[in-house]
Image (tube, helix red, strand yellow):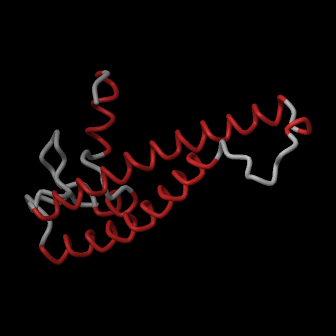
Amino acid sequence: MAEDTRTRYSDEELAEFKAIIVEMLDKAKKEYATLREVVMHATSNGTDDTSPSFRTVEDDGADQLSKEEASQMAQRQYKFIQNLEAALVRIENKTYGICRVTGKLIPKERLRLVPHATLTVEAKEMLAKSGRN
């Protein structure tokens, strides 16, 4: 495939990416709300559970693990939301899709899969080899 020598994506292309990101952002926010709900209510046993003697240490451990997992997932989801929102800002600034290391356009295929990407695959690999992000 020939390398794209343009300096930025067209307004029409940016609009296409914006639609993808807005849809992903909506889903991500719903998932985040669900995860937060799990984390906030994972410790409550409900008012009808008045007999804790039937609960075991393993049950309490499993509840804690799932709460920790949900909390970690919520943190990752929150970071994903922030990255998507930053991508929308780049679209508004017309800098979306430009690699922050090489200044080249990030291929559309990559942006469709990872719409918040700020690096080409080559730049990402180069940074990984040098031990930097």
Snapshot quadrant of residue 132: top left
Q: Is residue 90 left or right of residue 128?
A: left
The residue lying toward the viewer, choosing from 133 and 43, is 43
Q: Is residue 28 left or right of residue 120?
A: right
- Residue at the right extreme? 54
- When the figure is inspected, residue 55 is found, relative to residue 89, above or below; the finding is above
- Residue shown at the point (29%, 41%) measured from the top left: 122
The residue lying toward the viewer, choosing from 102 and 66, is 66
- When the figure is inspected, residue 8 is found, relative to residue 52, above or below; the finding is below
Snapshot quadrant of residue 15: bottom left
- Residue at the top extreme? 131
The quadrant of the image that shows the C terminus is: top left
Q: Is residue 60 left or right of residue 130?
A: right
The residue lying toward the viewer, choosing from 103 and 39, is 39
Q: Could you tell me residue 70's position as x and y percent?
A: 58, 44
- Residue shown at the point (54%, 58%) measured from the top left: 34
Q: Could you tell me residue 30's position as x and y percent?
A: 47, 64
- Badge count: 0
The quadrant of the image that shows the N terminus is: bottom left
Q: Could you tell me residue 96's position as x and y percent?
A: 17, 58
- Residue shown at the point (45%, 42%) measured from the top left: 75
- Residue shown at the point (23%, 53%) measured from the top left: 86
Q: Is residue 127 left or right of residue 49?
A: left
Q: Could you tell me residue 22's position as x and y percent?
A: 32, 69
